[in-house]
Image (cartoon, rainbow, N blue to C red):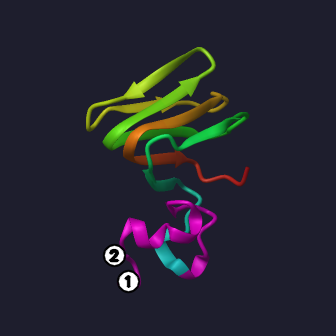
Amino acid sequence: MSASTWYRGNADDDGTDTRGWILGHFIDPSAGERSTETLEVKWGVHKAGEQRADWVTGDKRTTLVLLVSGHFHVKFRDGDAPLTRQGDYLVWGPGTDHSWEAQEDSVVLTVRWPSLPQ
């Protein structure tokens, strides 16, 4: 449901075609308020064992990852950071290489800013 200046939706439904991303520059402008260059938001639902095998390198954004449920493990070049308790979160700046793995079925909310093409 949407009005001219607001939008009501469901993260699972809205992120189906965008790997869980529900806000950002890559969302079709016809989606209204969801299309923005200010930030990117992802509702990530990951099965146990799912991982990003390749490292994210050279990112120009700041990132926040917040654990909603499960056990999620973010890997950095200089150490690993497990998120094990609901509400655990990580923040890292531009240029921080990272990868991740869901240790058990997990839901994470990711926010990146600004929203830039990579």
Q: Is residue 83 magenta?
A: no
Which residues are drawn in magenta? 1-30
The residue tagged 1 is: 2
Task: For label 2, count other residues whose C-alpha is less than 10 Å away and answer few (under 14), some (14-19) or many (20+).
Answer: few
| Rendered image: mark on residue 8 | 2
Which residue occupies 44% across, 39% down?
65
State the SS at label 1. loop
Q: Is residue 15 magenta?
A: yes
Q: Is residue 18 left or right of residue 34?
A: right
1 over 94 or under it: above or below = below
On the image, the x and y values in percent for residue 97 come to: 65, 28
Which residue occupies 68% across, 38% down?
59
Q: Amino acid at mark 1?
A: Ser
On the image, the x and y values in percent for residue 13 come to: 42, 73
Outermost top residue: 78
Q: Amino acid at mark 2?
A: Arg
